[in-house]
């Protein structure tokens, strides 16, 4: 085609043997393996994995080519086979919809109205306040005992999003045992793992005919998703909206009223949004606590800022944007611990020329946001936690600075970035304002390890176990 005229071939990259050599690292720590490969082959590289052409962007300029200059072309997603086997996923996905088509637009705009927009965030402020108070009471009742921070963050975030979507809690945080959260977290992790990591069948289509494995996995996941959302959707449908305790319509009311989505489809979208709103945010709150506990001076500075702003009253989210140092700490956490290190893989919807190379239709495009955020060419002392770097900086998280893309950018950018930021401020702000935290057995908090584990998102490998102590002076009478 004429526009490809003069373009060379695929971007450079490792050959089949070298890919095999790197394979286990590409599976278990792909962000690190791809950073190494970028040092050899440059910021635009490609290789084959079975039948699949993989293309990797490892610099702000190349990320801009894919997510801005040619944003529409690269706005597709790959549907892993296991996901295609899940009933009700066709035409009902935001995160994995193969193109930015009609149902993607519709679902994103309903999400915008009910959850993501600043107006919706204002309407939902009472939800955050209520769920955070539940969390504080839960922790308060466990003063002096060891708590598993990730579980509590996950349960609180799950209740915040399920209340915004369906006006219902998923958990009774007061009464429920942690096993319930664990089961739900296991399901969240299962869906993420099975829909985003490509099983061998995705790379070797010849196996498709004998692939009972993906089908079995999909049906198993389907049953669990139905168990979570089926009765909530059904009750709302039967009551014709009357079991919604709120005066305004929530997400579930609007998708039901639209009439184009089946119960299975609605269940999948709710699951997707639950995952989007819990996993990365939970990870970020945990890393933020880890970094602040390891850096006690920074922790004191955040505490002083919170104390000066809140002045002994109840913590009120409208005051938190004044806490600039605290915000810088959140931004720095999202830089050093990019929760989705390779974003969500993009797909070339047509063949396109980028930097004089050909990127064929259906190539899988990964942006190594993790590698870019730790590149010493763009960040001074890149692997250290230094919130000060964001204090007088114009760099924000909304995808306009390509050296900092924790939420991606362009058409497929995370629609929940502001919600996430607010939730992190409220959750961690409350943890720090209402409690002192120490390690079990009096261990020194500055020794907490920062070992990571890659499971599509980048978590702390070992759980963060902490002992809370109520700060009586900040509990309003
Ligand atoms: C710290 C928290 C979060 C991080 C780091 C994060 C990161 C991301 C990233 C990197 C993407 C993919 C962008 C791309 O493909 O280029 C994404 C997509 C998405 N996120 Fe988030 N996210 C977070 C919180 C949230 C929250 C709170 C919600 C919902 C309330 C949410 C909902 C979604 C959805 C629906 C998509 C799919 C967008 C699409 O494909 O059109 N995320 N997120």
Image (cartoon, helix red, strand yellow):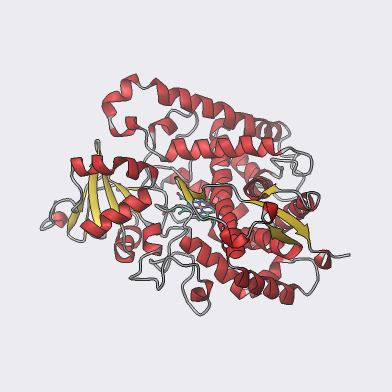
- The spot of residue 274 in percent (x, y) is 58, 44
259, 298: nearer the viewer: 298
Say which of 48 and 3 sits in front. 48
Q: In the rendered view, tell whether residue 9 sits above or below residue 65.
A: above
| Left or right: where 225 falls relative to 77 | right
Residue that appears at 70% across and 69% down = 318
Q: Residue 410 in the image: state x and y as whole percent.
A: 40, 59
Residue 138 placement (x, y as % from top left): 77, 49
**Residue at 48 percent of width and 55 percent of height:** 414
- Could you tell whether 207 is left or right of 194 in the image? left
Residue 37 in sight: yes
Q: Quadrant of residue 354?
A: bottom left
Q: Give the residue at x 40% y 39%.
A: 197
Residue furthest to the right in view is: 477
**Furthest-left residue in view?**
6
Of residues 444 and 205, the one drawn nearer to the viewer in this rendering: 444
In the rendered image, residue 92, in percent from the top left (x then y), is placed at 49, 39
Residue 91 visible from this viewpoint = no
Q: Is residue 252 left or right of residue 459?
A: right
Q: Which quarter shows the C terminus?
A: bottom right
Total marks drawn? 0
Q: Residue at x 57, y 57 (%)?
A: 448
Q: Is residue 297 left or right of residue 333?
A: right
């Amino acid at each position: 085609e004429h526009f490809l005229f003069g373009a060379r071939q695929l971007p450079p990259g490792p050959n089949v043997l070298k890919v095999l050599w790197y394979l286990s690292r590409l599976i278990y720590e792909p962000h690190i393996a791809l950073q190494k490969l970028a040092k050899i082959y440059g910021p635009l590289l490609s290789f084959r994995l079975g039948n699949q052409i993989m293309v990797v962007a490892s610099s702000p300029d190349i990320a801009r080519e894919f997510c801005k200059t040619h944003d529409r072309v690269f706005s597709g997603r790959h549907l892993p086979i296991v996901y295609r086997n899940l009933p009700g996923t066709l035409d009902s996905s935001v995160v994995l919809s193969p193109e930015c088509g009609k149902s993607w637009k519709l679902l994103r705009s309903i999400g915008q109205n009910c959850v993501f927009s600043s107006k919706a965030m204002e309407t939902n402020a009472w939800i955050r306040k209520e769920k955070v108070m539940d969390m504080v009471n839960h922790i308060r009742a466990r003063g002096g005992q060891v708590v598993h921070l990730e579980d509590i963050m996950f349960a609180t975030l799950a209740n915040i999003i399920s209340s915004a979507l369906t006006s219902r809690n998923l958990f009774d945080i007061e009464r429920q045992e942690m096993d319930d959260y664990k089961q739900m977290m296991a399901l969240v992790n299962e869906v993420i793992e099975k829909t985003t990591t490509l099983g061998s069948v995705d790379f070797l289509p010849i196996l498709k005919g004998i692939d009972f494995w993906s089908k079995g996995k999909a049906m198993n996941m389907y049953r669990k998703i139905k168990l979570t959302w089926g009765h909530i959707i059904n009750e709302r449908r039967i009551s014709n909206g009357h079991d919604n305790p709120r005066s305004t319509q929530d997400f579930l009311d609007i998708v039901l009223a639209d009439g184009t989505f089946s119960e299975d489809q609605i269940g999948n979208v709710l699951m997707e949004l639950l995952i989007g709103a819990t996993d990365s945010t939970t990870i970020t709150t945990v890393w933020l606590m880890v970094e602040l506990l390891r850096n006690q001076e920074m922790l004191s500075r955040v505490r002083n800022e919170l104390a000066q702003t809140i002045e002994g009253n109840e913590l009120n989210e409208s005051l938190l944007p004044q806490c600039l140092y605290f915000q810088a700490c959140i931004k720095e956490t999202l830089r050093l611990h990019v929760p989705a290190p390779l974003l969500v893989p993009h797909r070339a919807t047509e063949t396109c020329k980028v930097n004089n190379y050909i990127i064929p239709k259906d190539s899988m495009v990964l942006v190594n946001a993790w590698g870019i955020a730790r590149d010493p060419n763009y960040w001074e002392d890149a692997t250290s936690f230094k919130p000060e770097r964001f204090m007088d900086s114009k760099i924000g998280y909304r995808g306009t600075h390509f050296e900092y893309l924790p939420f991606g950018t362009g058409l497929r950018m995370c629609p929940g970035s502001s919600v996430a930021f607010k939730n992190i401020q409220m959750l961690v702000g409350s943890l720090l304002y209402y409690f002192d935290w120490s390690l079990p057995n009096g261990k020194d908090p500055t020794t907490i390890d920062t070992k990571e584990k890659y499971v599509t998102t980048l978590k702390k490998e070992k759980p963060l176990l902490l002992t809370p102590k109520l700060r009586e002076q900040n509990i309003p009478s």
